[in-house]
Each structure stands twice: as C-alpha cells, then as structure tokens.
Amino acid sequence: MRGKREQGIRTYGDRGRRIRAGAAALLAVVMAFCGLQQSARAVPVRGYTGWSILMCKVSDDASEPHPAGWLRNFFTDSGAGTGGMYDYFTSISAGAVQIRNSNAAGWYTMPYTLAQEQGRDRWTRFQDCVNAAKAGGYAVPAGHRTIVVTNVGIDWWGAAGAIYLDGTGLGSVSVAHEMLHGYGLGHSFSNDTGYRNAPWSAPGEYDDPWDEMSAANVYGSGTGGTYGNARPVGLVGYQLDRLGWVDHGRVAVAPAGWSSHTLTSFQSDDGFHPKLLRVPIGSDPFHYYTVEFTRKLGYSAGIPNDVVLIHEIVNGAPYLQRTLDGGARLPVTSLNANGDSISTSISGGAATVTVYSATSVAIYGPNTCVSGYVWRDGDYRDYTCATPATRSQTAADNAARYSRWVSGPYGPHTCISGYVWREAWPGDDVCVTPAVRSQASADNAAAPSRVLRP
C-alpha cells in the first residue's frame, strides 16, 4: 500500500511490515540464508558493498516493468551520476561505502503463479526468486546482499542483507529505505506516543521526517528524476554514527556540569568542529541524547529550514524530541529532562549548544568494541574492532607506506615486491604483507561480533 503525502511529496511505506508479529522470525530466517555472509550484515559498514539484484516473474504474467539496464543503473555504480542508489550512498556516507562489484540479473521466471506466490510465506517467496536465478545460471556471490524484484505486486520488505521489492512501484525514497535496512538500520521514532503512521506501526514510529528511516513520512526533495517522484532525505547523526560514517574526532561527549559546543553540519562540514554531540543520561552508557545541526542542503534539501535536532537514544533507536503542546510538533530547541539541560541556537553555518549534564559516564556509542578489542584505526573512520596487536601493526604499516610504493603498472602507489594493498576499505592502498591483508579481511568480516549492543 502506498503511503501518505508529506509536504507535497508522495513517499512509500514499508508495505512488507504490516504483519509485525512475524518480523523477528523473518529476520532470523533471512540472516540464516546461505548467501548472506557476515560481511553482508556488518555494522559498521564500509567498503565496496556488493548487491545482487534478482528480477523474477511469476509464471502467469510475462510482463517486465523495467529493463535490466534500468535496474542496473538504479542500484549500482553503472548508473553513477544519474541520481540512483550509488549516488545516494556515496554522498550520505561521504565515500565510506560505495556500491561496486554488483549485478542485476534476470528476468527469471519462477515456477509459480501470482496466486501461489501470494499464498507462500515471505522467506519462501524470497528463496523462490533466488532459486529461479540459480536455475537460470546466476548464483549470488558470497558476501553480496540480495534484492529480489518481482514483476507484479506481491510483497515489500527489507532485513539485514536481504530485500524484497515490487518492481511496479520502485522509487528512490522507498528503495533507499529498504537498502538501509539491508545495511542493518532499524526505523526511527519520535517521542510523540500519540502519533501512529498506520494501524500496524508502533507509537512514534516513522515520525522523524528528517531521517530516511522514517520513509513513510519524510522530507523528500525534487522530482526524483529517473527513479521515482522524489529524492530520499539524508540520515540523522545517530544513524550515520551507527553505520560508521562519522569521522573519528567529530563526535563530542558533554562532560559533567556546564559546557558549550559549536557544531558544524553533515551537509556543509567546516572540517573542524564536531558534527554530533552526545549527552549522557544517568549512568546507563547506552542511554543518551544526541544533538546535531542539519542544513537544507544536498539530500536534505527538502527539509523546511536549517534546524538543530535532539534525539534520545533508547535501546539502539533514535527518538526525535518534538514539542508536544498540541501545536506544530516542531523539533524542540531546548529541553530539561533526566537531570540534563540542553539549549541551542543557530548562527549562519554553525549551531551553538549549551549543556548541563548531571553525570559523566563513558558512553557506549554504536561502534564501541567489546573487551579485548580496540578500533583498528587504519584511518580517521576505521571503526573495525581488532586486537591491540593488529592496531599496532596497522599503525606501523601506515608509517611505512611511502617506502613501499613505487611507480609501476598500478600507478605511483604500486607495491614493491612481497607486498600487496591492504584493501581494508575503498581506496586503502597501504602496502602490507599478504598475511596482513588476509587479517584485515577477517577483521572486517568479524566486526559485528566485536561491537557492544544495548
């Protein structure tokens, strides 16, 4: 079912999330899918992420709503510069993730009619298309996340590493939302428990129009061009932080007592000030406020105006703090709650935040390593958790990089004999031994199991 209109922009809801009681079971089954490796479910997410887009038809309908080339351009780097998903994710991640080494294959005909597919459970429908592609000669490569696109409307959902879409209703807003589910994000919320986006949604769910994870209700922008009727909005700071797309040193934590902070924005970074501020709540290291400055630029061009957003992070989900006085339900500009006080103001391209924090606690942000592991710190945004010995090795390799580069067949950064590029993230051309490159790959794959979760 298509969603409501918001600020004149039609967006699409999670049509596959009407039956919420089955969501947990679906996620557990999808994550067990043989083609979904740890790297396909990893949070944080970095690197050249591969997707397999499988196009499938039911046996009693031969229609093909889009040619394979159109879908390939929409989802992969072959469509760079056309406003598709490659452009969106490269932009909002500031290059931390790029959709590369991906494939769009089909259309394959499944041996089931529309009525038969509608009567099957979600996982079986997903697997029917995967099986049809395999029978047609395409097997999903290890590590790829998988998108199933059907030629008729059957279902619509996203989970870690797997997405199921109706090919007749594709648009950038809804597709970006589901792909972010595929990268491991959940929905965003507000503190307004009286808001219900749909009878089946939770109170406050989808009530953060500044965040793409509320895609039944977001400030999309423009016309969407080739891919639907609007461009998706960006992500709020907590979501970017969870995905590992915020630079080291650009997240500040308010100390106990009074403090003042100047924030730059994710949309027009000044290269110096913090982009995100965390404010502790009590002694729970997983419970805190985030404060960020969001500007009406880029993928956030559809928001009404520049704004400071305050979110309460509860159980790993961001809750936008809105005014609940029965009026416009605007984002709050200040608050006094949980022993904390936060006030904000905007001046030109920066925001000032004055904070009183009742406590000083080590906040466990979304990429804090479990005991025994530390950030590898290969660069300013390397949140991969590794052993202290690996971090020391990484620092030593970084320091020696100039002595291991020569001009050769791979350009001025060709490795000397006995060394290879580390390739721990896109563009990582530090030369290391083959064993170190293998270790970097193994650490990337093991990253989800080494991060603290609320």
Image (cartoon, helix red, strand yellow):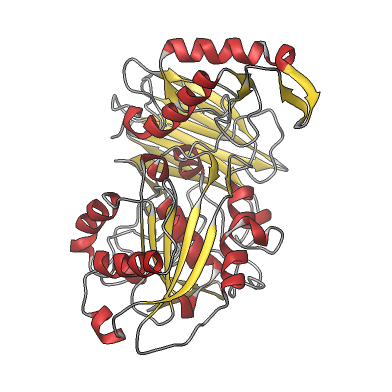
The percent coordinates of residue 225 (x first, y second) are 67, 72
- Asked whether 328 or 320 is in front, the reply is 320
The percent coordinates of residue 446 (x first, y second) are 37, 31
Instruction: State whether residue 57 is above or below residue 186.
Output: below
Image quarter (top left, top right, bottom left or bottom right) of the N terminus: bottom left
- Asked whether 65 or 57 is in front, the reply is 57
The percent coordinates of residue 216 (x first, y second) are 43, 67
Instruction: State whether residue 427 is above or below residue 399.
Output: below
Residue 284: name its quadrant.
top left
How many numbered marks does the figure carry?
Answer: 0
Residue 204: name its quadrant.
bottom left
Q: Is residue 196 visible?
A: no
Residue 25: name its quadrant.
bottom left
Image quarter (top left, top right, bottom left or bottom right) of the C terminus: top left
Residue at 36% over, 34% down: 448
- Asked whether 418 or 154 is in front, the reply is 418
The percent coordinates of residue 218 (x first, y second) are 50, 64
Q: Is residue 31 visible?
A: yes
Instruction: State whether residue 128 is above or below residue 445.
Output: below
Residue at 44% over, 88% down: 62
Residue at 42% over, 28% down: 442
Instruction: State whether residue 239 is above or below residue 355.
Output: below
Q: Is residue 285 left or right of residue 21?
A: right
Residue at 40% over, 54% down: 181
